[in-house]
Structures are given as structure tokens and as C-alpha cells.
Image (tube, rainbow, N blue to C red):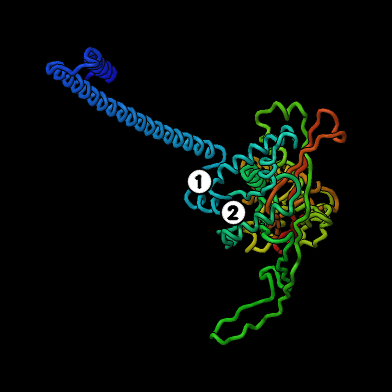
Amino acid sequence: MNNYEELIKQGLAKTTQAQAILAEFESKDLPAEKAAEFDKLMSEADSLKQRAERIKLVLERDAELQKQAAAIVAQKQAAEQIVTESKAATAAYQMRYGSDDEAKRVIMSELLGADYRDRIDHQNKAFIRYLRYGEKAIDPADWQALKQQILPWDQVEYLIKTGGLSVAEVKTTMVEAQGTLGGYAVPPNVQQAILSRLPGLTAVRGGGARVVQLTNGNATEVPYFTGGDDRYATALRGVWGYETATPTAKNATLGMIPVVAQVYTYKVVMSQSLVEDAGNLIDLVQAAITDTLAIDEDEAFLIGDGANKPLGLLPSSANGNSLSTVNTGDADYLTADGVKGLKRGVASQYRRNAVWVGNSDTFGDIEVLKAGTGDYLFPDMSDDDMLLNRRIFESEAMPDVAASAYPLLFGDMTGYWIVEKFGLTIQRMQDSGTGPNVVEYHVRRRVGGRPVELWKFVAAYVSA
């Protein structure tokens, strides 16, 4: 195909020759042969022009098509890049916060929006900025993210599966949680990591206490039965016979006891240097929160006096709840007979799930109890954390073995009820009160508890 510009040049040459003929005979008639030559030159010029225009049209159309093709390729590459980035973002999210199944995606999208992954990720990034540098490091978007209390997925699942709440009601609960807690919200994955470890570090919660998650308000009432005995929790009895038979005993007393989720606060102290330099700062803060929370919680559940805190099983290290007791068999020490008698102090229907609770020294005393032959009486303790085929939970909150003390508990922990409010918040403090090179993290939550079914427990009393 001839070049467009070459054809134009050739056409211009033809018109130039035609113009020369006209110039030669400017004031005369053209001879027949010159007129024929002139017409021929103009015809050839027109032909060259038309060919050039066709070529130009083809070139322009080709350029347009190439541009469109390039745009299509660019769009495809951009789409592929978006897909790649999305897959990478999804993989990163799953590595940080766990995988999502279809049900979780649908519910979390309803609770937080279709961009819930981005919102959780943003909250985590804002959280680490806040932990390191305080409020000066967070912008308005970070502040907004840290003021939203997002429930961990396990709690959302619990509310829907066990609590029977709708997704809309869970959303209302989440708003309620963020409205009643001060400070900045702890991201859901960090909350979950803390709360999931508590049972493994505690005797009461870990032993199987009933946990009530509050969806409204900061307190609830739990049923309190009296009038029963070791076998029956109440005086209610059934009757065998026909449909219209009336039970012969119905003198149970049913009361309602309020259990309040008390305000619980404590602080984690770190050096400024550690806060700035530690790559695993969240892990460090998380571990400190969990350990302190577990120790404080268990102490309150075991010996708390109920004054702005949970009521313990042995308030203030004494048997203020009048639990059933079994004497140890000695005025100052534990005895094997006393330990075995303690297990029999709980009715058989509650003994199956019962656990032992005492401090390390108390179990150490039991470990070294020997028969007259010199053999250890409870050899299973050191290897399996079991005593008489029941689990052992150690808590240093429990009193030592001493005259008139209650150093050992045996019971079914479902008789203790824990109430807790969703959500966990934190405030970073660094001022003249904290001292130089010191950062304090003040943690806040709402939790309460009290023993409700006292017949499920028995305490060892150090007495002959």
C-alpha cells in the first residue's frame, strides 16, 4: 500500500503541472492537445487524492481500533490486578483474623457493611497506632473506627445460635455495648484472643461456671431455689399415674437474685521504649491483659465479698455462703480421709462434673500424703492434674491450710453464675502521673458473678 503522504505529494505534482499549462496559455485558448493534457493531469490528481483519503481513513480507523484494543487490554490487566489484590487482601485478612464461610460473610456484612473486612483491618491498624503513640497519632477516621465496638465472631455466633437473637438484634446489642463502655474499643480479634484464653487460666470459669452474656442493661436476675435437699434442687416432685394427677409436693420457694456486671478496670504498664520498638506490641499487651484479667476474675469469683465486685464462693476467704463442709480430720492439716470425705460431700448427680479448687501449697500437701507403707496415696496428681479422677484447678486466691480455714473446694461449677457485658475498651495514659518513659494502658470491662446453686459445692474445713 502506497504511503498516504507520498500520494499527496504526487497529487500536488500533478496539479502543479496543470497550473503550469494554464500559466503558459494565460491569455489564450488552450490548444486541444494541451487541454487534453490538462484534463488528464487533474484527473490523475483527483485519483491520487481519493486514494490518499482512503488510505488516511484506513489509518485513522486502524489507529482508533488499536487504541480501543489497548484500552481493552489495559482494562483487563487492571481487572486482573484488582482480583489479584483482592485475593491477596483476602488471604492477608484470613491470616490475621481467620477464614470466613458464607454464613459469616452474610451476617458480618449485615452488621458492619460489605466492607467489614476493611473496617476490622482499619480498626486493628488504628489500634496499634493508638497503642504506640496515643491520640496524637490517630486521625478522625481512626477515631471513628476505635469508637465502634465490634463483637468477636464467636460472640455473634453465640447470640444467634444460643441466644436466639436476630441479626438486627445483634446489631442493636453491638451498639449498646459501645454506648456503655468508655475509652477506645479493642478490636474483635484481640478481644477473642483474650476471652478464649480465660477458661484455661481460671478455676471458676474454666471449671464450667454458667456464663450469661448480657444483651441489654448491666444486670440480670437469676433463679434461686430453696426448699430442696441433696437429691432435689427444690421441693418440687412429680407423680406417676394418669394425666390429671396432681403432684403431691409443690412447696418449692423460687426467688430471684440480681447479678450485676460490675465495672472492672486495671492497668498494664510498659516502658516507652518497648511500646515504640516492639514489633509484637499487641501480643504483649494482649498477654498482660489476659493474665491480669484471669487472676483478678478468679480471685473475685472465689473469695470476693460482693461489694462492687462479684460474690465469691468463699467470701473473704471464709465460708460466708454457708457451703456444706467436711472436716479435714485434723485441727491443723489435711488428711487422706478428709480429702476422700470431701468428694462424697457433693451429691452423686453433681459429682460427675465436679472439680477441685485449691492453691498450689494445698495440692502440694495432698501430693505428699503417704500410707503407712510409705507409698503416696494420690500418685495421679503430679502426672495428670487429677485427684480421685476429678480435675484440679489451682488458684493462689484460695487460703492456705491452717486451723479453721477453708483451703479446698470440691463442686460442680455450673452452680456459679457469671454475667458479663459485651465489649472491652482501653485507654492509653502517658502524663506526669505515669512518670517518665512509662506508658499505662487502662482496660475496662463489665463482669459480675455469684454462687446460685450452693448444694453443688462443699468446702474442706480444717478441723479435727
The image quarter in which residue 22 lies: top left
Q: Position of residue 403 (x, y in %)?
A: 85, 51
**Residue 128 versus residue 248: which sits nearer the camera?**
128
Q: Which residue is mark 1?
A: 100
Instruction: Give above or below for 30 relative to 160.
Output: above
Q: Residue furthest left?
A: 33
Q: Secondary structure at mark 1?
A: loop
Q: Is residue 261 left or right of residue 19?
A: right
Name of the residue lying farthest toward the right: 432
Checking the image for residue 156, the label placed there is: 2
Which amino acid type is marked by label 1?
Asp
Q: Is residue 419 left or right of residue 117?
A: right
Report the residue at 55% width, 54% height from top. 110
Q: Residue furthest bottom?
A: 244
Label 2: element kind: helix
Q: Is residue 15 above or below residue 177?
A: above
Q: Is residue 6 visible?
A: no
User: Of the residues under marks 1 and 2, which one precedes in the sequence?
Assistant: 1
Quadrant of the snapshot with the C terminus: bottom right
Quadrant of the drawing holding the N terminus:
top left
Q: Assess whether mark 2 and mark 1 are in contact (beta carbons under 8 angstroms).
A: no
Residue at 69 percent of width and 72 percent of height: 234
The Cα–Cα distance between marks 1 and 2, rounded to whole angstroms, is 14 Å
Give the image quarter of residue 230: bottom right
Quick one: label 1, few (<14), some, or many (20+) residues within 10 Å? some
Return the x and y of residue 91 as percentages of the image width and height. 50, 37
Tell me the crowding category of disc 2: few under 14, some 14 to 19, or many 20 or more residues within 10 angstroms, Cα based.
many
What residue is drawn where x is 70% and y is 59%?
Answer: 417
